Image (cartoon, helix red, strand yellow):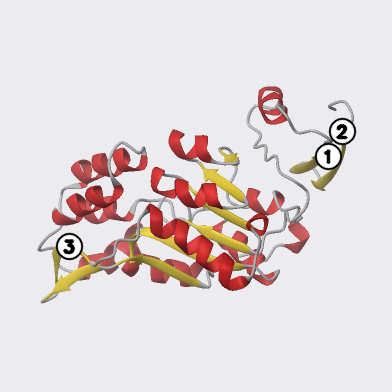
Amino acid sequence: MLPGATGAWIEPGSAYDLFLSSPDGVETRLRAALPGVDVVVQPVAHRRKRLLVADMDSTMITVECIDELADYAGLKAEVADITERAMQGELDFEAALDARVALLRGMDAAVIDRCREERVTVMPGATTLVRTMRAQGATCLLVSGGFTRFAGPVAEEIGFDRALANELLIEDGRLTGKVRRPIVGAAAKHDALTDAMGALGLDRAQTMAVGDGANDIPMIEAAGLGVAYHAKPAASAAADARIAHNDLTALLYAQGIPRSEWVMA
């Protein structure tokens, strides 16, 4: 126990609350002392959030949809390389999205639904996280730099209030290789959080954002608790909290919510 600290189990054997008078340097010390344990340092006030804004690809689902879609055209390696560089912050997100979508020009639009059905899997803990937060009165938004044909069904399956994503343009049943403007990128994710916060009359401290890539950084930085989930280094560096070992139910423990209050999927 750290000097002056008190504590209590949220969930015996799984999650522990440690109350400190000063949190300075404690995260680094605890991570070093407890390898394989996720540590979230935050104020006690407003720890139960009233707004969740979440990324989709590699956060609420296990894949990058555009990479999987490109696989049906035999272009996964090329597209995945651009995706990785964009998520690392090495490429402008909008330009990278345009470049990747252009490669899919002429693809049968029916492949989108096939890809979703065959490749998209919900991230462990996602449904429990969202449904539990909504049961406790929170609003949950899925905000994706991916595509509406994936985000809509994913949001419905998990239990989000609504979804915002990019629309692939289709003509005569085939992809045109273009995305409808304006693109849902980093700025749109940030604005989705701040607009919802204003509409709901919430303070910043009552909000949480979670993502994994560079285009999630503005919303992560704008939230009361910005979370990097199994994230790229740039997103991890920008976040208040990093979940690297557990699934998304760790964000329920971070809010002090024991398993007895979870809405199980």
Residue at the spot 57% in from the left edge and 48% down from the top edge: 226
In percent of width and height, residue 201 lies at 64, 70
In percent of width and height, residue 257 lies at 75, 56
Q: Mark 2 sits on what residue?
A: 5
Q: What is the quadrant of the N terminus in the image? A: top right
In percent of width and height, residue 60 lies at 48, 56
Say if 147 sits above or below 81 in the image: below
- Specify whether 101 is left or right of 7: left
Q: Residues within 10 Å of mark 3 (few under 14, many from 20)?
A: some
Q: Mark 1 sits on what residue?
A: 19
Q: How many marks?
A: 3
Q: Which residue type does callout 2 highlight?
A: Ala
Say if 157 sits above or below 242 in the image: below
Element carrying mark 1: strand
Label 3, label 2: how far apart the Cα atoms are = 55 Å
Q: Residues within 10 Å of mark 2 (few under 14, many from 20)?
A: few
Label located before the other in sequence (2 or 1): 2
116 or 217, which is in the foreground?
A: 217
Q: Residues within 10 Å of mark 1 (few under 14, many from 20)?
A: some
Q: Mark 3 sits on what residue?
A: 178
Label located before the other in sequence (3 or 2): 2
Label 3, label 1: how far apart the Cα atoms are = 51 Å
Q: Which residue type does callout 1 highlight?
A: Phe
Q: What is the quadrant of the C terminus in the image? A: bottom right
43 or 8, which is in the foreground?
A: 43
Element carrying mark 2: loop
Q: Does the residue at mark 3 contact the one at mark 1 (Cβ under 8 Å)?
A: no
